[in-house]
Each structure stands twice: as C-alpha cells, then as structure tokens.
Image (cartoon, rainbow, N blue to C red):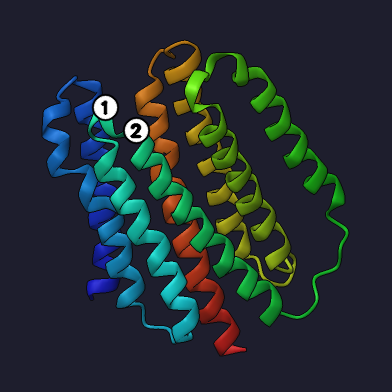
Amino acid sequence: MLRPRSLIIYFLILLADILLIALDKDSYRYATKPLLVVLLAIYVLYADVKIPRSFRLFLLLALFFSSLGDDLLLFNNLFLPGLGSFLIAHIMYIIFFLKIRYSNLPVPFCKYPLVFLNAAVVIVFILFLVPYLGSLTIPVIVYALALSITVQSVLHAFHFRRQPTGWYCMAGAVLFLISDSLIAVGKFYHPLPGGDILVMLTYGFAQWGLVYGSTEYFRVRIMN
C-alpha cells in the first residue's frame, strides 16, 4: 500500500506547497517542498514492478539530485549550486531514457519535426534571454541545452503508439522545460504574475509524469 499512498501524499504536499506560495508563507515551504521528490523516490523504490537495477539506479539518481536542487533553491544565494544540481539530475534522466531507447526496439525516426521544433524553441529562448543573463550566461545556456536533450531523449525512447505510457514521460519533460523557462523569465527578465505558482505546478506534474510514465513503461513491458 505504500506505493499508491506515496503518490496521494505527493499531490497533497504539492497542493500544500502551492497554497503556501499563494499565501506568501515561504518560510513554511521548508516543511513541504523538500518532501516532494523524496515521495517520488519512495514510489520508485516500492513500485510493484521489476525495474532493472541499472535503470532504477539512474532514475533514483535523477530524483536525488532534483531533491538536492529543490533544497538549495530554497535559499536565494544558492541559485548556482541549485542549477548545477538540477543539471546533474537532467544528465541522469538523459542516461535513463537513453538506456530505454537502446533496450527498446528501434524507434522509427519519423519525429524529426518535433526534434527540430524542440531545438528551435530552446535556441530562440536562449537568444531572447542572453542579454539579461550577465555572469550566468554560460551556466544557463548549458542548463537549457540539457533540458532540450532531456526532451529529445524521451522523444526517441518510446514507440508512443504501442507504448502510450511514454506520453507521461513526454509530458513530464515538456512541463520541466516550461517550468524552468518560467523561472528564467521571472529571475532574469521580469517577474510574472503568479509565476511562482505556475513554476511549482508545472514542476510538480513534470516530476510525477517522468516517474509515473517510467514505472508504468516497465510494468507494461514485463507483462508483455
């Protein structure tokens, strides 16, 4: 029962965290935000599906560094270490989805329009943001490229018609891109009305989509 309960608690904590943002009670978020990814890690650890050890390791590492990034970003003066931690998290996600890609049957390369669209969006966004980045130009560009590669790795990992659980991962990767883009715009360009709420909402569903889609993929694969 721990596995489904961890997801129920996850969404309750996510709701509580968003309410704290809306009520401008940021000091209380030290009790909510750090729990979120920990609950997803519990979900992965106790999932009633046999995820191969090497796959599970990289998924847990992605969650570990995401959790560390969440903790660091609670402090305004630790933005760069937080960014670095999330960069490592994305590298772990990229390795995880590449492992799925190369253990899966060959995926037809009919997705070039989406590949180019993803690349174009990230390049345009980087060009828009560069004049405002100052000393953080290189770290932010590197992180943006990692986000783009995460989306690409998910895009190529699944046969979406025959493996529809991959859509959860795809939605998660895109929401992660949106969430971090909102952070960048709010921090470097101009604060957005309700931006913090939108960031947390998209981030919460992004991490859930990546984790839930991944575990369900292995459940269906083993059943088949």
Could you classify mark 1 by the number of other residues whose Cα lies within 10 Å: few (under 14), some (14-19), or many (20 or more)? few
Q: Which residue is mark 1?
A: 76
Residue 140 place in picture, x, y as percent: 53, 33
The residue drawn where x is 53% and y is 50% is: 172
Residue 146 place in picture, x, y as percent: 59, 47
Name the amino acid, label 1.
Answer: Asn
Q: Quadrant location of the C terminus? A: bottom right
Numbered badge on residue 79: 2
Q: Secondary structure at mark 2?
A: helix
> Could you tell me if the residues under marks 2 and 1 are in contact, i.e. CB atoms within 8 Å?
yes
Q: CA distance from mark 2 to mark 1?
A: 6 Å
* Residue 194 visible in the snapshot: yes
* Residue 51 visible in the snapshot: no
Q: Quadrant location of the N terminus? A: bottom left
Could you classify mark 2 by the number of other residues whose Cα lies within 10 Å: few (under 14), some (14-19), or many (20 or more)? some
Numbered badge on residue 12: none
Residue 148 place in picture, x, y as percent: 64, 45
Q: Quadrant of residue 6?
A: bottom left
Q: Is residue 153 above or below residue 76?
A: below
Q: Is residue 41 above or below residue 22?
A: below
Name the amino acid, label 2.
Answer: Phe
